[in-house]
Amino acid sequence: MSNILSNTFNQFFSSEKSSGLLLIACTLVSIALANSAIGLHYLNFWHRDIAGLSIEHWVNDGLMTIFFLLIGLELERELYVGELSQFKNALLPIIAAIGGIIFPALIHFIFNHGTPTQNGIGIPMATDIAFALGVLAILGNRIPASLKIFVVAFAVIDDLGAIIIIAVFYTSQLSINYLFSALVVWILLIVLNRRFHVISLAPYVLGGALMWFFMLKSGIHATVAGVMLAFAIPFSTKNDDEKSPSHRLEHFLHKPVAFLILPVFALANTGILVGTDWLQSLANINSIGIIIGLVVGKPLGVGLLCFVAVLTGVCRLPSDLQWPHIVGAGLLGGIGFTMSIFITNLAFVGNNELVNGAKMAILLASLAAGITGFLWLKYATKSTVNPSS
């Protein structure tokens, strides 16, 4: 795994770490407002109807589609020219992501199997890239460049797994006609790219908007259209990476997503009511499954599967990484936040009590994972300072 970070990666890392700090601020503001004298007005604002959908719905199904488009573009870049473009480099973060998905889900399933909260199995699966990179940024040069790349790679794959889970398991009544229409639009965009080599972004953006509408009506979550659109947009590996439409759009979206879309999402979705029974809500089986899944399941899954893969010779550990780094990355993987909250809204539609309790568990688990990961990487990796990273 190369120690030389590309300009694109450095820009991505910089924007994500700043976004993490802003997300924390927005979360604290949202919780404070929800539990203040104007709390009822604040919460009702997000449920105000505009053009048939609530403001919260527009944020979660509309704005977040742009976030998923950016995730898709980042994944496309990693697959074409990044760390995932070479199988030997991609294998370790792929295995880490698989462990980071399976173990938390299994833990939640053990606690919630056969109960009304079983549908929350997807909540502890994903990793919040912004917060994870924010912690790494605070640690600075103590962290090797390879660890930053490793965390981004397995977090992006984690999010891809979450997207697949959203599409497959959190689908309401399915409309085949609308789904077929969305797929037709997607195929036409791919033909524009691969057959006619259209590099203007305009037809892809317009086609993406149409695909989003069809996906919204199909019953499959509309944000999936963002990822599909990303893989229809031209990406050139022959010319300078910065000239490709995919790269230009990714570069353009970084700051709006980091400093507008995700903060608005945090404001709309973290208005958590902290009542007198807040301890009881954290003690139910759903919250316990989420907390243990994120705080214990993530590092256990990431570390154990990576260890087995390296021990059996399936892949190797990068030369500047040590096992404490992998454990630390797994601990940071327990910062679920954005994707975990997103899946919570899909898992318990209409059950405000469950949603509120699950979000409280997510915040607590993410805070614990972030602090534990920071302290672990700070004190367990003292001898691995890399001033060149």
Image (spheres, rainbow, N blue to C red):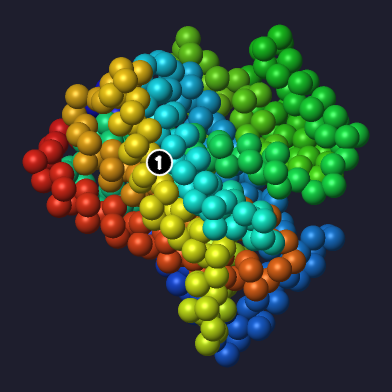
Residue occupying image coordinates x 79% and y 60%: 53
Q: Position of residue 361 (x, y in %)?
A: 49, 66
Q: Position of residue 92 (x, y in %)?
A: 37, 26
Left or right side of 384 for 78: right
Quadrant (top left, top right, bottom left, bottom right) of the C terminus: top left
Q: Nearer the viewer, residue 244 or 337?
A: 337
Residue occupying image coordinates x 80% and y 49%: 172
Element marked by disc 1: helix
Q: Which quadrant of the view contains residue 265?
A: bottom right
Residue occupying image coordinates x 52% and y 78%: 280
Q: Is residue 370 above or below residue 164?
A: below
- Hey, what amino acid is under mark 1? Gly
Q: Which residue is mark 1?
A: 301
Confirm whether residue 351 shows in the render: yes
Q: Position of residue 111 (x, y in %)?
A: 54, 58
User: Callout 1 environment at 10 Å: few (<14), some (14 to 19), or many (20+)?
Assistant: many
Residue that lies at the very extreme toward the right in this rendered image: 177
Q: Nearer the viewer, residue 143 or 13?
A: 143
Q: Is residue 351 above or below residue 258?
A: below
Confirm whether residue 243 shows in the render: no
Q: Position of residue 348 (x, y in %)?
A: 69, 61
Left or right side of 192 for 249: left
Quadrant (top left, top right, bottom left, bottom right) of the N terminus: top left
Residue occupying image coordinates x 57% and y 51%: 109
